[in-house]
Amino acid sequence: MRLLGLDPGLRHTGWGVIDVTGNRLTHVADGCIDISVAMAMADRLVALYDGIETIVARYRPDAAAVEETFVNKNASTTLKLGQARGIALLVPARAGIPVAEYSTNLVKKSVVGAGHAGKQQVQMMVRVLLPGCLADTPDAADALAVAICHAHHAATESLWQDRAPIVTVRA
């Protein structure tokens, strides 16, 4: 299964693609969509849409995962980030790809073991879990961490869905 992880932002959106075979994770690609702050908001959203659409077309993921918005003290910043996250959810969904969402703390806990880990810790653990991966930017490392988190949680969810109920109560 091929997974796309996205760490949305209006200036830098990290993306990472991994392959999952059983419990083995393999790095495929990662990067960052960089968008100029000099652009109008609508143009920035179009650029983000086009960038993610290119990644989806190139790597053909089977599923995608997006990091949830971290609520900032500045409400305006949080709302703007929400627009970028909407694009990150929309593009794979329009391509018919199932999209999952994970909180920042769950992603960090899944990869590092601590929900309040720093960006450097996440970047280091991503490199450990995906040998050969450089994850040069923190945004790309965060996106790969989202994909890794989804790989772990999707496998568990799949096991739960495949299980038949042990007890059935009928009225």
Image: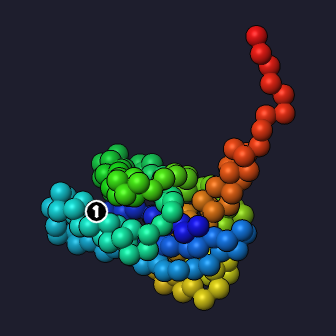
Q: Is residue 90 above or below residue 31?
A: above
Observer-nearest of 85 and 96: 96
Image x and y of residue 59, in percent? 43, 74
Left/right placement of residue 157 relative to residue 69 reads right
Which residue has dot 1 on it?
49
Q: Quadrant of the image for the C terminus?
A: top right
Q: Nearer the viewer, residue 41 or 25?
A: 25
Residue 70 in sight: no
Q: Measuring 66% from the left and 67% from the top, which residue is drawn there?
A: 111
Q: Amino acid at mark 1?
A: Tyr
- The residue that appears at 45% across and 64% down in the rendered structure is 7
Q: Disc 1 on helix, strand or loop? A: helix
- Side of 82 where 110 appears, left or right: right
Residue 78 appears in the picture as rendered? yes
- Residue 129, position as x, y percentages in the image: 67, 77
Image x and y of residue 82, in percent: 36, 50
Quadrant location of the N terminus in the rendered image: bottom right
As drawn, is 82 to the left or to the right of 19? left
Q: Is residue 61 left or right of residue 24?
A: left
Vertical relation: 52 (above or below) 135: above
Q: Residue at x 51, y 60 (%)?
A: 63
- Looking at the picture, tell me which residue is in the foreground, 100 or 96: 96
Image location of residue 164, percent across then percent down: 77, 38
